[in-house]
């Protein structure tokens, strides 16, 4: 999945994570850094910078999903890898049931189009 | 990977729920194995090695989490999904520690249930593809 992704994609991916998790536990921040660095090639500074600068409601969840699908070439393997990464973040978050419900809804939107 | 190709172990102590879900699963999966508690589930897992383990959490003898812990000792990559409700926060925390990432939220919703099963089937396929890269 490691690639050179566009800024638009990085913002959409980070923003989508924040739609799900909403509040990142500072104790777990390094683990989120690691996942985003490894899977999406987003450096910790970049992750923080995006997180601080975006308003997650500026674009809708469906628009973010469209940006991500397009950047991943509408390929099932890449999209599933992305969803598995989001799923990994949910586990990291301690799996609050409300976060899981939000993940499920986003996951299903992606999967409807696979 | 279509669900039709996969085998599922379903563990549930409530016999009425067990019958209902078993019927639904049999229409969608290749093989369905059913157990009524964690002990029985673990024994059946060792015998059948299903692709997916689907389990309730609260059960007599051995609960779903304890069974999942034992299964993960056998195969840390085993795909497991747990049925859970909004008030199961402590269980969810323990499940997260076991790296269980898929839940079937209660009350039961047929569409959501199939979405989650299809997701699991595709996760299994993606992991297989990933190993071949």
Image: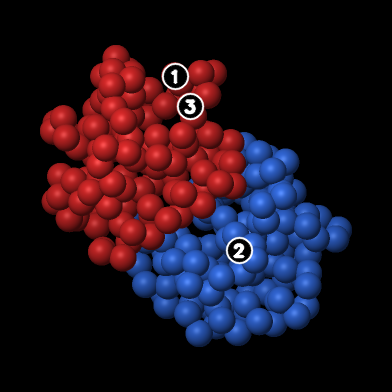
Residue B32 point in image, percent of width and height: 58, 77
Distance Cα–Cα, label 3 vs label 1: 10 Å
Distance Cα–Cα, label 2 vs label 3: 29 Å
Q: Earlier in the sequence, mark 3 or mark 1?
A: 3
Residue A86 lies, with reference to residue A2, above or below; the image says below
Q: Secondary structure at mark 2?
A: strand
Chain that bears disc 2: B
Which residue is more in the foreground, B126 or A84?
A84
In the rendered structure, find residue A50 and report the number of the disc placed on it: none
Residue B112 lies, with reference to residue B92, above or below; the image says below
Residue at figure coordinates x 58%, y 36% from the top left: A94
Q: Are marks 1 and 2 on the same chain?
A: no
Distance Cα–Cα, label 1 vs label 2: 32 Å
Q: Which residue is mark 3?
A: A24
Tag nearer the camera, 1 or 2: 1
* In contact (CB < 8 Å): disc 1 and disc 2: no
Q: Which chain is blue?
A: B
Q: Which residue is mark 1?
A: A30
Residue B128 point in image, percent of width and height: 35, 55
Chain that bears disc 3: A
Q: Secondary structure at mark 3?
A: loop
Residue B97 point in image, percent of width and height: 62, 37
In the rendered structure, find residue B54 and report the number of the disc placed on it: 2
Q: Count neighbours of disc 2 (C-alpha within 10 A) and say few if under 14, some if 14 to 19, many if 20 or more.
A: many
Q: Count neighbours of disc 3 (C-alpha within 10 A) and say few if under 14, some if 14 to 19, many if 20 or more.
A: few
Residue at figure coordinates x 59%, y 41% from the top left: A96
Q: Is residue A63 visible?
A: yes
Q: How many marks?
A: 3
């Amino acid at each position: 999945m490691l690639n050179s992704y566009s800024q638009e994609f990085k913002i959409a991916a980070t923003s989508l994570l924040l739609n799900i998790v909403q509040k990142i536990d500072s104790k777990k921040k390094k683990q989120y850094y690691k996942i985003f660095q490894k899977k999406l090639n987003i450096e910790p500074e970049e992750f923080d910078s995006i997180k601080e600068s975006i308003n997650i409601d500026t674009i809708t969840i469906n628009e973010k999903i469209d940006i991500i699908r397009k950047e991943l070439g509408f390929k099932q393997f890449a999209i599933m890898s992305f969803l598995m990464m989001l799923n990994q973040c949910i586990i990291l978050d301690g799996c609050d049931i409300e976060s899981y419900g939000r993940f499920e809804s986003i996951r299903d939107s992606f999967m409807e189009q696979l | 990977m279509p669900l039709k190709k996969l085998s599922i172990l379903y563990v549930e102590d409530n016999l009425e729920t067990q019958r209902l879900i078993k019927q639904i699963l049999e229409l969608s999966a290749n093989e369905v194995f059913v157990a009524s508690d964690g002990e029985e589930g673990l024994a059946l897992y060792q015998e059948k090695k299903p692709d997916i383990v689907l389990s309730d959490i609260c059960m007599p003898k051995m609960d779903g989490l304890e069974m999942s812990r034992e299964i993960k000792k056998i195969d840390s990559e085993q795909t497991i999904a747990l049925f859970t409700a909004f008030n199961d926060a402590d269980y969810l925390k323990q499940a997260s520690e076991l790296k269980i990432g898929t839940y079937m939220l209660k009350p039961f919703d047929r569409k959501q249930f199939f979405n989650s099963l299809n997701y699991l089937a595709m996760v299994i396929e993606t992991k297989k593809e990933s190993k071949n890269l």
